Each structure stands twice: as C-alpha cells, then as structure tokens.
C-alpha cells in the first residue's frame, strides 16, 4: 500500500511528482504529500485527504528540481496532516517517504529519544528518518548511512530519502515493498510502481529486496546491503499510459467492467490451439512430462484473487480431473504448510505485489516446491519471484475493486483446465467445445454490458437494504463470494456469501423481508436443489434476485436476470457480469466513492 515517487533532473519536480502521485493514488489515498529540495532546505507540503486536497494547498510554481512524494494508506497513526508523508526528522536534515511497516519502531523510538530526537507524528516512518540522520552523523555518505540504518530495522520498507546538505541526490532502498528506478535523459525517477514513471521514461530497473539505489540526475548506482555494486542493464517497459486514464467514463470501476470483452480477448490472444484443440502458454517453463507428473494443484491468492482460485479449482477438477483446491495465501504462509513436490502451486495476483501472496510463493520455493504465477502486472514482484507462469494482459486496473482482472483470471483458469485436460482425458471434441465457448465469450460479455440499465434498476431497487445474502453451489458459490465481496467493498452493505446447500443449516434464521438474497442459479444438474432453496427463502418472505438461464426462475423470484449459458467453464464468467454492475450501481445509489472505497487500497503490500 502507499505510493511513493521521486524525481531528480532538470525539470521542475513538483508537476512530475503530482503526475506520478495521481497515477499511484489507487495504492492508498487517505493523505498525500511532497517534499522539494531547494537551497539547502525542504519545502514540505502534506495534507490529510485525497491528492486534490494537497493540490489545493500548493504554490503555483516551485523551482526545485529534486523531490519526493507519497500517497498514504494508514498503518501506524490515523490519517492526518501530521502523519502524512514525507516525514522530516527533528533537526530538519532528512526527509523520507516510506511504504511498509517498521516492526521494531517502538524500541527504535525509545533509543532515538535518548539520543535527543523528537517525534511529531505517530508513524513508524519518522523513526526511520531519525535513525538515518543519526547514522549520517558518523559520515556524510547518505547511501552508507541508510545501509547502516536499515541493518537495525525489522519489517518491510520501500523508502526514498533526501538530505538537505546533499543537493540533487535521492537514495532508495527496498525490503519487501516494491521500488522501481526509472532512467531518463539526464534525469532519474523512482517509484513504488511503474505507473508513476511510465509517462516519463520506459527504461527501468526493479530493485530487489536488500538493494539500495543512489540517484542523481546523471548517475545511478545500485548496491546490495553489503555494499557490493549490483548495477544491471535497464528493462524497457511497454505500458499504454492511456489505458490508465478514465477517458469518458464516470469511474474507473465502470470503465474496467465495460472493457472486459477486450481484456478477455487479450488474455486469450495467441493461447488457443485450434489444431490440437488445446491451449498453449509461452511462459510456464514446464513441458508436458513435467505437468503430467503433478498429482495435485493448489491455488493461492488473497481476496478476489483467492476467490477466483476457488472457482478455478472447480474448473480444473471438472475438466482435467486432477485434484485441485484453493487457499488464502495469508493463511497458507503462516501455518507451516507441507510442500509436496508432486503438487503444482499457482499464485494468483492482479498487482503482483500482495505481500501475503509473495511470501507464500517464497515459502513454497524455500521448501523446494514448484510455483507458477498468474499475474496481471508485468514485471511485478510475484511475477519475478515465480519466474514462470502466465500474464493476464488485462491492462492496468486502477479501481480498488478488481473486476476485469477477476474475469481474466477465470479465463486463464479455463485455458489451464483445457491445457491440462487435453494432456489427460479430455477428447479433441470436448476441447473444441471449450475453444468455441472461449471464442464466443467476449461478444457474450459485450451483450451483457449493453444491458447495464437492467442491472442498474435492480441495484437501485435494493440499494437501501442494510444486509444481503449471496448464495450458489460449486462455481456458483465462488461467484456468490465474489458478488458479496464486491458489494461490501464499494457500498458498505453487510453482504454474506453462503453455499446454497448450507442455508438451512443456520443462516436461514436471518432471512426476513429486510434481507434480500442474490442467487446464482445456472441451468445445471443442481437446478432443482437451488429452486428448493429459493422456495425456502421465499416462504420466509426474503426478497430474491436470481441470475441464471432457466425461465422457471422468472416465476419464483422477485427479480430474474437472464444470463446466457454457453459452457460450464465460461458460464461463471458470464454470471459474474451482473454481479459487478449490481455492486457498482448500488454504490452509486448510496453515494459511495466507488473507485476508492474507505479503508482500502489497491495493492496490499503490508502484512
Ligand atoms: C478485490 O476487489 C480486492 N480489492 C482485493 O480483495 C484484492 O483482490 C486482494 O487484495 C488481492 O490483490 P491482488 O490480486 O493484487 O493480489
């Protein structure tokens, strides 16, 4: 969480930092600030609230050509002007922006107080600034001071630091929180992700954990925490920066729901093998023999990525008949998991930066397991840590809630199910059916997108209820979990997902006329069972909105959303679309900030 950005060169730093922060605001948005280095001092501007609040306090012009900026998602200390970054240590010598958590901040603060430092904020970050200032007293090498300081720090950090007596220099360090350096023509950039740098340069270097970058306008040097130089060639990024703008849409969330047909086309692009009725992937680094040796698959992720994994597990088991399950990466990493060499692990992450998922990957690798990434952001930490896997190519997803990347992840699982299935028992004819369904998917989603007014009316009808259930069976239960998560994230309605089969075992007690149920009811062999569950709800006067393919539903529920059926592997993706629109329009009807819901951030890079 938190976005960091820094610039040194010949341009005015302030507009560069603001442009970068605007592109990072989705990482955290409860306060923002910038520090500009000018004539041996810092001009510091920071404000609680969104970036626009900060913008309103800035001078029209500032001549500084070196500066750092931050957009915050609060961990230590409430969102306030004082707790906003950058922090300046008490003598005014050092300023810092930080993404991560210093776990031993309490002990360090006590030590530094004894050394005469005072602290204006409640943050752990200010402790880092003081620690570096203390080390700087020993020599005047900022990089060496940071190296010594971080050796005393427990926790995670991506930091960028400036010293007032070392003009035109920024030093960045990384441990567990992403940092990327951008190399321009006589100018350098640094940020927590490439979105902030992409408008200015395409030449970048990702810092690895345990590295420090020393940056001046004309020079960059990377070294590890032992002071060994680790400079390496730059990579060229390929980012369409226009994709990261809202265009004519009112919200990123809406734009990202609407652009799902194109996003899915990109996920599928070049991966369907019409000749052998299978899929192919460029980056798995596993041949058929390797894949056939795995006896199980385990999918890991957090939040929506975890939910997509649970649906993906059903898809893979259904088609490829290989035992597959999904688990929260955060739970997995803390329970000393048994890593089985005959299990293929898949790590799912839109951002590729989710700390719990990244550390789960590291835990698997440390114990000798094989893990592939299913990731959207190219070059992100999880993608690089896995070293093999599949990119979603969904394009940048800026809204905090995942929509198009969820759909693309389900598509990726369908491809994987087809690929592994065709190595096992799936016939060419069955493979051809999956390919047909995948090829038809973008247009079918487009047709649903064009029905958004219908979903809007239903959302507005139920928007003022204070709670809701989402139910389904098998993949439908996964969709219910995703529908409930989307609704609670953006509308703050208490939404709970249950397997339809479980309702009568307890939750039915809460059904009444004030508790609507959103039911996922595909026309499959469980239809009759689902209809019985809906009858049980209606008997208790619970309003029901059902989405599925059977016209029978229309007579049994309050609102019926007809969703075309195609194939068991692609039907969950079609059923997802109304759920996304319902969450979006409910949030609008309740006046919520749909793109940046309270308390959340896009990229969860802390524990
Ligand atoms: C989804 O709407 C959420 N904002 C959240 O659950 C998200 O899916 C989760 O934090 C994982 O993120 P990732 O895909 O970037 O790893």
Image (spheres, grey):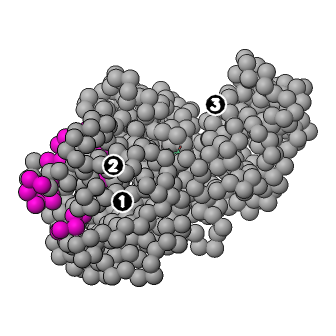
Q: Label 1, label 3: how many angstroms apart (C-alpha)? A: 48 Å
Q: Is ligand 1 closer than 8 angstroms to the Cβ of mark 3?
A: no
Residue 29 screen position, x and y as percent:
50, 57
SS under mark 1: loop
User: Residue 528, can we see it?
Assistant: no
Q: Which mark is residue 474?
A: 3
| Residue 376 vs residue 62, the one in the foreground | 62
Q: Which mark is drawn over residue 119?
A: 2
- The residue depicted at 73 percent of the width and 18 percent of the height is 506
Q: Nearer the viewer, mark 2 or mark 1?
A: 2
Magenta stretch in the rendered image: 137-166
Q: Is residue 119 left or right of residue 83?
A: left
Residue 139 magenta-drawn?
Answer: yes
Find residue 222 and report its horizontal and vertical position in percent.
16, 59
- Mark 1, Cα crowd under 10 Å, few <14 / some 14-19 / many 20+, is many
For the residue labelled by badge 2, is the local secondary structure a helix, a strand or a loop?
Answer: loop
**Vertical position of residue 22 compared to residue 300: above or below:** below
Image location of residue 102, percent across then percent down: 31, 42
Q: Secondary structure at mark 3?
A: loop
Could you say which disc has been placed on residue 513 in the image? none
Query: Which comes before the other along the chain, label 1 or label 3?
Result: 1
- Image quarter of residue 7: bottom left
Q: Quadrant of residue 484?
A: top right
Using the rendered image of the protein, determine whether residue 582 is visible from the camera's viewpoint. yes
Instruction: Identify the residue at image location x=64%, y=56%.
Output: 593
Where residue 143 sits, quadrant-wise, is bottom left
Left or right placement of residue 566 versus residue 361 in this view: right
- State the residue in front, 80 or 173: 80
Taking 417 as reference, is 368 above or below it? Answer: above
Name the disc covering residue 86, or none.
1
């Amino acid at each position: 969480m938190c976005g960091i950005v820094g610039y040194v060169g010949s341009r005015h730093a302030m507009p560069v930092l603001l442009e970068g922060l605007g592109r990072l605001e989705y990482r955290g948005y409860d306060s923002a600030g910038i520090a500009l280095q000018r004539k041996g001092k810092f001009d510091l501007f920071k404000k609680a609230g969104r970036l626009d609040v900060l913008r309103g306090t800035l001078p029209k012009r500032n001549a500084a050509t070196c500066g750092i900026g931050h957009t915050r998602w609060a961990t230590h200390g409430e969102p306030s002007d004082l707790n906003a970054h950058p922090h300046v240590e008490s003598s005014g010598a050092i300023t810092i922006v930080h993404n991560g958590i210093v776990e031993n901040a309490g002990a360090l603060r006590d030590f530094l107080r004894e050394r005469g430092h005072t602290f204006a904020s409640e943050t752990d970050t200010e402790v880092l600034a003081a620690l570096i200032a203390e080390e700087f007293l020993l020599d005047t090498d900022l990089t060496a001071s940071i190296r010594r300081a971080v050796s005393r720090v427990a926790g995670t950090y991506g930091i960028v630091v400036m010293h007032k007596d070392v003009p035109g220099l920024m030093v960045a360090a990384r441990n567990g929180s992403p940092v990327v350096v951008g190399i321009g023509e006589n100018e350098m950039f640094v940020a927590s992700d490439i979105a902030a740098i992409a408008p200015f340069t395409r030449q970048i270097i990702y810092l690895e954990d345990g590295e420090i970058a020393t940056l001046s306008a004309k020079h960059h040097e990377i070294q590890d925490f032992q002071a060994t130089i680790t400079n390496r060639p730059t990579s060229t990024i390929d980012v369409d920066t226009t994709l990261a703008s809202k265009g004519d849409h009112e919200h990123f969330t809406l734009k990202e729901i609407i652009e799902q047909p194109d996003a899915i086309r990109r996920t599928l692009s070049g991966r369907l093998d019409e000749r052998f009725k299978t899929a192919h992937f460029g980056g798995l680094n596993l041949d058929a023999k390797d894949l056939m040796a795995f006896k199980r698959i385990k999918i890991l992720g957090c939040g929506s990525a975890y939910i997509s994994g649970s649906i993906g597990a059903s898809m893979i088991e259904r088609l490829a008949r290989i035992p597959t399950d999904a688990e929260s990466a955060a739970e997995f990493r803390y329970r000393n998991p048994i890593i089985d060499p005959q299990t293929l692990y898949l790590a799912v992450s839109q951002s590729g930066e989710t700390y719990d998922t990244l550390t789960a990957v590291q835990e698997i690798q440390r114990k000798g397991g094989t893990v592939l990434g299913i990731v959207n952001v190219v070059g992100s930490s999880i993608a690089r840590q896995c070293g093999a896997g599949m990119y979603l190519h969904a394009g940048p997803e800026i809204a905090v809630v995942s929509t198009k990347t969820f759909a693309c992840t389900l598509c990726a699982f369908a491809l994987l199910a087809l690929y592994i299935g065709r190595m096992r028992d799936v016939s060419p004819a069955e493979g051809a059916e999956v390919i047909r369904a995948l090829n038809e998917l973008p247009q079918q989603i487009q047709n649903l997108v064009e029905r958004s007014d219908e979903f809007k009316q239903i959302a507005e009808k139920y928007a003022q209820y204070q709670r809701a259930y989402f139910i389904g069976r098998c993949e439908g239960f996964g969709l219910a979990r995703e529908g409930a998560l989307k609704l609670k994230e953006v509308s703050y309605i208490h939404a709970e997902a249950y397997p339809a089969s479980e309702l009568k075992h307890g939750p039915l007690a809460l059904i009444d006329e004030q508790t609507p149920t959103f039911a996922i009811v595909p026309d499959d062999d469980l239809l009759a069972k689902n209809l019985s569950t809906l009858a049980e709800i209606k008997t208790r006067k619970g309003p029901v909105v059902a989405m599925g393919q059977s016209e029978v539903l229309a007579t049994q529920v309050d609102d019926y959303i007809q969703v075309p059926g195609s194939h068991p592997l692609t039907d969950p993706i079609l059923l997802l679309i109304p759920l996304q629109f319902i969450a979006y329009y409910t949030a609008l009807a309740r006046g919520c900030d749909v793109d940046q819901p309270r308390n959340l951030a896009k990229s969860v890079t802390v524990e």
